[in-house]
Image: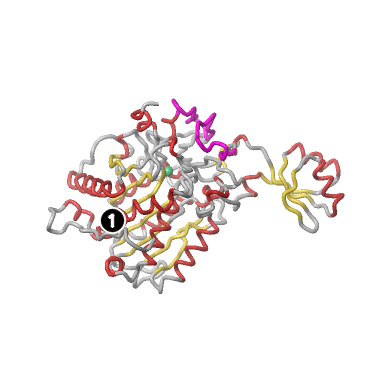
């Protein structure tokens, strides 16, 4: 494949995987990656729509009882005193019925909502480790950090955690300081986008006493929400192999799972670049803000409109810095804002090496976070598409080796925005006057 074609087809998660179609047989009309060319394809599990396997818990005891279950075709994975758990299907449960063995069966994905990454990617945070490590940061922060939930996911058993760094206000207390929010993992399979905001939180906590960091933290209200879609993130790793799952876990019926959260926001919702078909990977949901995850973000943002000036949402992959609009072509009508966006994006691109552009410069996508944040509330909003550049460099699953280098590349942009959160228009002020001069944060702390 020609390099230029590769660059153009390195589709953004924030937009649509449809542009993989030519090279990668990606069926944009469904959630199913068909014959996906992927260097780690052995780690990609069958998508749920094709996976009729069940987790079966059978009430048996003793070796003879367990043998009966195995003989029904079920692979036992878990043994308790009076039951076994294992993987099978509906045909096998009929055999248990005929044998008179009581059982419960749930879809495999449901049972394994808290399983784990493949062993080689154990450095990534699943929901449980993220929760524990965020709590650990709070404990280690000397009172700087606090943790609260902005809501729950579709399944209702997980929290969307928000770590707050504020030298005076805790939890959901009001603060008059200018605020910034960093988000990750709207899209389930973009696990690297959990790691970067988490490491940013860790960096800020660990370096809170360094003069340049202490100075920033003293005057800002910093919110970090590393996992907007905890249900989806867990679902993607539920079998111990990656599922290539993008959406949340809403049961659409008919075997289709999930709404694309980054098409569910309520600014020009349901227009181009999103789909009304539930089995599409870019399904925009039954209505704007139909999903608990996007409702949680909406409430979080709208509770802080007086102070929240900048929103940075991490996705992967393609190495891009994107800004509004996504739902239509062309620059913003507001030329002052357009200039500020361009300056901010180009400045940050110098540090992370990503390509700055309008979201719609590749193709239209409506209902995303940044269009809503800017369109509805005039919050400066960026999408960073993290490493790698292409599917052929690892795509959504670049491996644990990408974590620290990707964070390092994006630390300075993140601190730059933090500094500008009082007035992002300072970015385009003449040099030497009020333009931000970010410190060099790339030494120490990592
Ligand atoms: Zn994404």
Q: Residue 77: x, y in percent?
A: 72, 49
Which colour style is shown? Answer: secondary structure
Residue drawn at point x = 41 percent, y = 37 percent: 390
Element carrying mark 1: helix
Residue drawn at point x = 17 percent, y = 51 percent: 428
Q: Quadrant of the N terminus?
A: top left
Q: Residue 346: x, y in percent?
A: 24, 45
Vertical placement of residue 63 versus 221, above or below: above
Q: Residue 208: x, y in percent?
A: 34, 69
Q: Is residue 102 left or right of residue 212?
A: right
Residue 199 quadrant: bottom left
Vertical placement of residue 422 versus 337, above or below: below
Q: Is residue 63 left or right of residue 26?
A: right
Q: Residue 434: x, y in percent?
A: 15, 59
Which range is magenta? 21-45
Q: Is mark 1 within 8 Å of ligand 1?
A: no
Does the magenta portion include 373?
A: no
Main secondary-structure element of the magenta-colored stretch: loop
Q: Is residue 153 left or right of residue 57?
A: left
Q: Nearer the viewer, residue 76 or 107?
A: 76
Vertical placement of residue 215 versus 301, above or below: below
Q: In the rendered image, which residue does mark 1 sit on? A: 417
Q: Is residue 99 left or right of residue 428?
A: right
Q: Quadrant of the C terminus?
A: bottom left
> How many callouts does the rendering have?
1
């Amino acid at each position: 494949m020609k390099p230029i074609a590769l660059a153009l087809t390195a589709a953004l998660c924030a937009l649509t995987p449809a542009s993989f179609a030519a090279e990668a047989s990606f069926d944009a009309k469904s959630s199913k990656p068909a014959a996906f060319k992927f260097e780690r394809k052995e780690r990609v599990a069958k998508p749920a729509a094709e996976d009729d396997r069940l987790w079966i818990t059978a009430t048996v005891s003793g070796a003879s009882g367990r043998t009966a279950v195995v003989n029904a075709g079920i692979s036992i994975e878990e043994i308790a005193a009076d039951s076994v758990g294992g993987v099978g299907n509906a045909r096998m449960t009929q055999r248990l019925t005929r044998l008179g063995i009581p059982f419960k069966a749930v879809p495999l994905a449901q049972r394994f909502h808290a399983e784990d990454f493949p062993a080689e990617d154990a450095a990534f945070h699943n929901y449980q480790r993220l929760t524990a490590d965020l709590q650990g940061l709070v404990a280690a922060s000397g009172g700087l950090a606090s943790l609260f939930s902005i809501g729950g996911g579709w399944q209702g058993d997980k929290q969307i955690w928000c770590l707050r760094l504020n030298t005076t206000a805790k939890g959901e207390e009001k603060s008059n300081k200018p605020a910034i929010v960093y988000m990750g993992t709207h899209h389930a399979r973009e696990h690297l986008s959990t790691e970067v905001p988490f490491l940013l939180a860790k960096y800020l906590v660990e370096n809170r006493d360094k003069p340049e960091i202490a100075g920033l933290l003293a005057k800002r209200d910093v919110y970090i929400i590393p996992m907007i879609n905890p249900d989806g993130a867990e679902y993607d790793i539920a079998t111990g192999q990656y599922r290539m799952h993008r959406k949340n876990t809403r049961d659409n019926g008919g075997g289709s799972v999930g709404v694309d959260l980054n098409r569910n926001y309520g600014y020009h919702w349901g227009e181009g670049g999103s789909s009304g078909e539930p089995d599409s990977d870019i399904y925009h949901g039954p209505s704007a803000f139909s999903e608990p995850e996007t409702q949680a973000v909406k409430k979080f943002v709208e509770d802080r409109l007086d102070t929240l000036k900048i929103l940075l949402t991490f996705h992967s992959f393609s190495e891009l810095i994107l800004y509004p609009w996504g739902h239509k072509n062309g620059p913003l009508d507001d030329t002052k804002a357009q200039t500020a966006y361009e300056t901010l994006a180009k400045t940050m691109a110098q540090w992370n090496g990503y390509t700055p552009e309008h979201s719609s410069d590749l193709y239209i996508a409506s209902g995303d976070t940044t269009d809503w944040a800017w369109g509805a509330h005039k919050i400066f909003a960026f999408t960073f598409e993290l490493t790698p550049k292409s599917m052929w460099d690892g795509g959504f699953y670049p491996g644990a080796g990408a974590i620290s280098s990707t964070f390092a590349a994006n630390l300075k942009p993140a601190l730059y925005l933090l500094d500008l959160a009082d007035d992002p228009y300072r970015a385009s002020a003449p040099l030497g006057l009020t333009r931000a001069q970010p410190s060099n944060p790339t030494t120490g702390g990592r």
